[in-house]
Amino acid sequence: MAQVLEFKLPDLGEGLTEAEVVRWLVEVGDVVAVDQPVVEVETAKAMVEVPCPYGGVVTARFGEEGTELPVGAPLLTVAVGSAEATESRGASGGPSGDGAASEASGNVLVGYGTGAPAARRRRVRPTPVGQAPATAADPVPTTAAHPAPVTAASSAPVRASAPAPTSVPVLGAVDPQGPVAVISPLVRKLARQHGLDLRQVAGSGRDGLILRTDVESAIRAADEDAAAVPSTPARPEPDTSGERLPLRGVRGAVAEKLSRSRREIPDATCWVDADATELMAARAAMNAAGPKVSVLALLARICTAALARFPELNSTVDAEAREIVRLTGVHLGFAAQTERGLVVPVVRDAHTRNAESIGAEIARLTEAARDGKLTPAQLTGGTFTLNNYGVFGVDGSTPIINHPEAAMLGVGRIVPKPWVHEGELAVRQVVQLSLTFDHRVCDGGTAGGFLRYVADCVEQPAVLLRTL
């Protein structure tokens, strides 16, 4: 009678806890050999083919292509020792008898695979009464290197009077000098780090296999025992008396948003110094010919042009769906300091406005912010933020992204500095630009390209004429 064994997604190493099924290499009903690749999976590290440690007939598959499975989830089941598998291997000239028992392809992934049976010591078991002695064609007993027994196939037909095979020792039955019932190197490493003797741990897996949860439970028990032992008196707590200010209202909302940004967004910052002399000259010419346009409005217009070229930075991350949502419109937020604290009003549809229109909207929203009349709709829905901290007299900063946006551009003060211009040292108006971005939405090449384009527009405003 065939024995149905379940093959689970093995530990693929390097702390990986899941893998995506890319392509099945076998169908239900196919005959597989020991260590034959049965599925191709993709992890965060690479694409790998997973070999099955059992030989037999595939009876079920778990997980369609494109499905993500955690380590330890069932992959497929194999009927080991079935007549169909035996006849198929015998007809194809494959291994049978002794050959099947000693087959070892070497296709080993972290946590399981075949070893070299001949190199292992074999226990001698007493022959039960009424049972014929084991012969050379009997299966090799399973050791700690084999997660489950594999029944040897024979090319000869199975007779009803054939003697029962010798029993296979369970994985947990380890003598003091033999191997420990652990197949995951991560589990061994965890035990070593905590000084845990694996021989004292009872395995809850198949055939007594010691799992990571078993080791973690043993570690917790040891910690609880250690905590029960009286310890030395703790040092006195530092004096925390003083004025306490509640984190409420605007300050509380800002604190929560900034904390969430730091917790959830893997941000990175790049910066560059730019010669803003030509930009300041262009602004002076515009103001002489019409309504005044602020430096912030010009930088905002430059940002909308840069976002059109690098739309990756005008996006957000849906963590639950594990998707990057690239947004179509640019709703530009700008940081404004008020008596009630920092607020970020939003200029709606900034990508459809020119510098004069953006400047007028910034002025209107800034006045409403100072009067405390901004509505919630005017403070939410931004897709990108511009932060001009140069008004505080500082040159640079590393901005914190305004969650759930993907980037923020920081602008320092514009001051006269020595600068090499057209091959000669000159005094120029220099500004430092800092871009903090969510590393999940793009890499440094995209972020650097965005920042370089902004700096080029600052140094040569005529570059903007291509997008106006």
Image: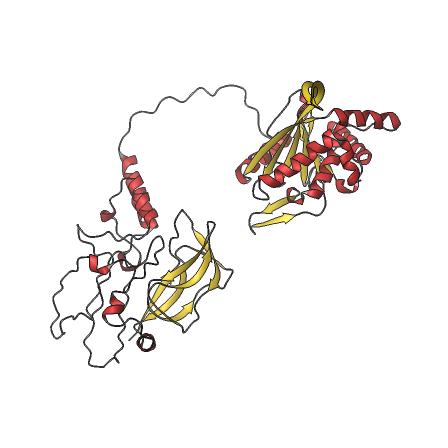
Where residue 349 sits in the image (x, y, percent)?
76, 42
Q: How many marks?
A: 0
Give the answer, above or below, for where 305 lies relative to 214. Answer: above
Q: Residue furthest front?
A: 423
Front-lying residue, 202 or 43: 43
Quadrant hosting residue 292: top right
Quadrant hosting residue 286: top right
Visual colour scheme:
secondary structure
Where residue 344 sits in the image (x, y, percent)?
68, 33
Where residue 439 sits in the image (x, y, percent)?
56, 41
Where residue 117 sits in the image (x, y, percent)?
23, 60
Front-lying residue, 95 or 322: 95
In the picture, measured across the screen, residue 304 lies left or right of residue 126, that is right
In the picture, measured across the screen, residue 310 lies left or right of residue 154, that is right
Q: Residue at x 79, y 32 (%)?
A: 359
Could you tell me which quadrant the N terminus lies in? bottom left
Quadrant hosting residue 30: bottom left
Q: Can residue 414 be seen at all in this image of the molecule?
A: no
Q: Residue furthest right?
A: 289
Q: Can residue 211 be seen at all in this image of the molecule?
A: yes
Q: Residue at x 64, y 38 (%)?
A: 449
In the picture, measured across the screen, residue 330 lies left or right of residue 399, that is right
Could you tell me which quadrant the C terminus lies in? top right
Front-lying residue, 154 or 12: 154
Q: Residue at x 38, y 67 (%)?
A: 77
Give the answer, above or below, for where 417 lies relative to 147. Answer: above
Front-lying residue, 330 or 106: 106
